[in-house]
Image: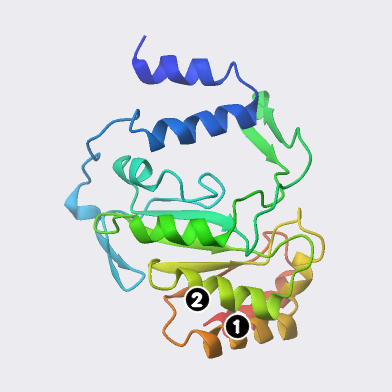
């Protein structure tokens, strides 16, 4: 059996979140390989104000704490989005909170923005090599004591020198009240606060809920552009 298949089979014997953490540890320690997977030069394209090797990237949620960026880069992604990270550390929702749907080949995620906070996240992002893989930072607010108009600008300021782009996360159903920030007036206030506080911010993206009312989308898209 190939080593990759053996590792996958072993991970599937573990509880889902334990398997996830083991995968992060393996990537961080270089156990997934030390050489970058080469990309076909025909796949290179402009994005985020730079050139990326290919238009396939890793979404936020896998490496919440920017702990395995070098290992993920070696897998050959064109970009890796770390996070979601909040201003202060928080434990997330009670366990179990990650569930396998074996028949569907899918997962249910109820993690709740568990992360170690922006300070360490930004430091790890600063040490990462962005030459071959663009790095994004997905930013959210704490479950308790959050002030979106202060927290999002502070988060962007912390990662702006070290990220190729930033994603403002207002879509998670696991943080009470977060989706209320998708209202046009509230989102506009957040984006204005970020632009005022961090005028030289990297490209900003807004992560919206997939089930948002389609009638609300045009105004939000115009606002983001």
Q: Position of residue 159 (x, y in %)?
A: 46, 68
Left or right? Give the position of 156 relative to 214: left
Identify the colour scheme used.
rainbow
Instruction: Name the image quarter holding residue 18.
Output: top right
Q: Nearer the viewer, residue 14 or 212?
A: 14
Q: Position of residue 154 (x, y in %)?
A: 57, 75
The extreme left residue here reads 41
Instruction: Name the image quarter holding residue 210.
Output: bottom right
Left or right? Give the position of 222 relative to 3: right
Q: Nearer the viewer, residue 198 or 5?
A: 198
- Tag 1–tag 2 contact (CB < 8 Å): no
Residue on which disc 1 sits: 191
* Neighbour tally class for label 2: few under 14, some 14-19, many 20 plus, Cα within 10 Å: some
Q: Nearer the viewer, residue 41 or 91?
A: 91
Label 1 to label 2, Cα distance in Å? 13 Å
Earlier-in-chain disc, 1 versus 2? 2
Left or right? Give the position of 174 relative to 25: right
Q: Please, is residue 33 above or below residue 136 in the view?
A: above
Q: Which mark is residue 157?
A: 2
Q: Which mark is residue 133?
A: none
Question: What residue is at 49 percent from the left and 84 percent from the top?
Answer: 198
């Amino acid at each position: 059996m190939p080593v990759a298949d053996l590792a996958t089979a072993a991970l599937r014997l573990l509880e889902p979140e334990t398997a996830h953490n083991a995968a992060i540890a393996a990537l961080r320690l270089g156990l997934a390989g030390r050489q970058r997977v080469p990309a076909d030069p025909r796949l290179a394209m402009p994005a985020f104000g730079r050139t990326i090797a290919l238009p396939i990237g890793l979404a936020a949620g896998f490496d919440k704490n920017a702990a395995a960026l070098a290992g993920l880069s070696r897998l050959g992604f064109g970009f890796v989005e770390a996070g979601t990270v909040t201003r202060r550390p928080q434990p997330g929702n009670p366990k179990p909170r990650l569930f396998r749907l074996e028949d569907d080949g899918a997962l249910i995620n109820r993690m709740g923005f568990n992360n170690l906070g922006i300070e360490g996240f930004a430091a790890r992002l600063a040490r990462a090599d962005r030459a071959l893989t663009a790095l994004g930072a997905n930013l959210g607010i704490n479950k308790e004591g959050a002030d979106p108009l202060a927290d999002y600008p502070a988060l962007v300021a912390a990662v702006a020198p070290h990220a190729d782009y930033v994603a403002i996360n207002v879509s998670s159903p696991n943080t009470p009240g977060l989706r209320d920030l998708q209202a046009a007036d509230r989102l506009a206030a957040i984006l204005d606060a970020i632009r005022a506080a961090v005028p030289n911010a990297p490209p900003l993206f807004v992560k919206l809920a997939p089930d948002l009312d389609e009638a609300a989308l045009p105004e939000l898209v115009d606002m983001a552009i």
